Amino acid sequence: MKRIALLCLAALSASAWAAAPLTAEQTKTLIAGNSASGFADALGKNYTAYYSPEGKLTQVLDNGKKRVGTWKITDDGHFCTQFPTESERCTKVVPSENGEYQRVKDDGMVTNTFKKFYKGNAYKY
């Protein structure tokens, strides 16, 4: 029984990595200076966000709560975000077949889905 559970978990994790993660340069091109709408699995909320070219992140949750933090991309392609009251979260950005992008932890867990990107500061944050 334990073996079946582990195989199922491995299959689910592998599906998150079905597409190759973006490189550091691809991630930077997608995110830097642009806005996104998405769903934060950890918060269970939709959000909109702006990622300034200087590394400032402004996020507004669907309940209207505004959060300001920072973002960066590491040399190995991890996309990291941090808010003042939270630990830094680093993930790979993986494209989905439906045009969305997922933030995926190294263990394969999906933490976030970018539903759509917009050029520039689309939400005027």
Image (cartoon, grey):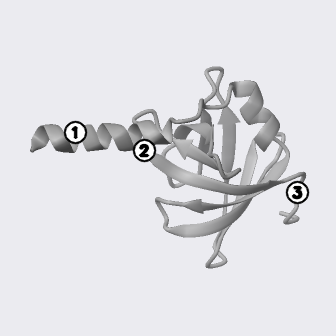
- Label 1: few (<14), some or many (≥20) within 10 Å? few
Task: Tell me the tag on residue 28.
Answer: none
**Which mark lies nearer to you, 3 or 1?**
1
What secondary structure is found at the residue carrying circle 2? loop
What secondary structure is found at the residue carrying circle 1? helix
Instruction: Tell me the residue that label 2 is attached to.
Output: 109
* Residue 31 placement, left or right of 94: right
The residue located at (61%, 21%) in the rendering is: 76
Q: Amino acid at mark 2?
A: Met
**Which mark lies nearer to you, 1 or 2?**
1
Task: Please tell me which of labels 3 and 2 falls first in the chain.
Answer: 2
Check the image and name the residue furthest to the left. 1
Instruction: Tell me the residue that label 3 is attached to.
Output: 121
Q: Amino acid at mark 1?
A: Leu
Measure the C-alpha gap from mark 3 to mark 1. Answer: 43 Å
- Provide residue 68's location: percent of width, then percent of height: 68, 57
Q: Indicate the quadrant where residue 58 lies.
A: bottom right
Task: Please tell me which of labels 1 and 2 falls first in the chain.
Answer: 1
The residue located at (51%, 41%) in the rendering is: 104
- Label 2: few (<14), some or many (≥20) within 10 Å? some
Measure the C-alpha gap from mark 1 to mark 2. Answer: 14 Å
Q: Amino acid at mark 3?
A: Asn
Check the image and name the residue furthest to the top. 75
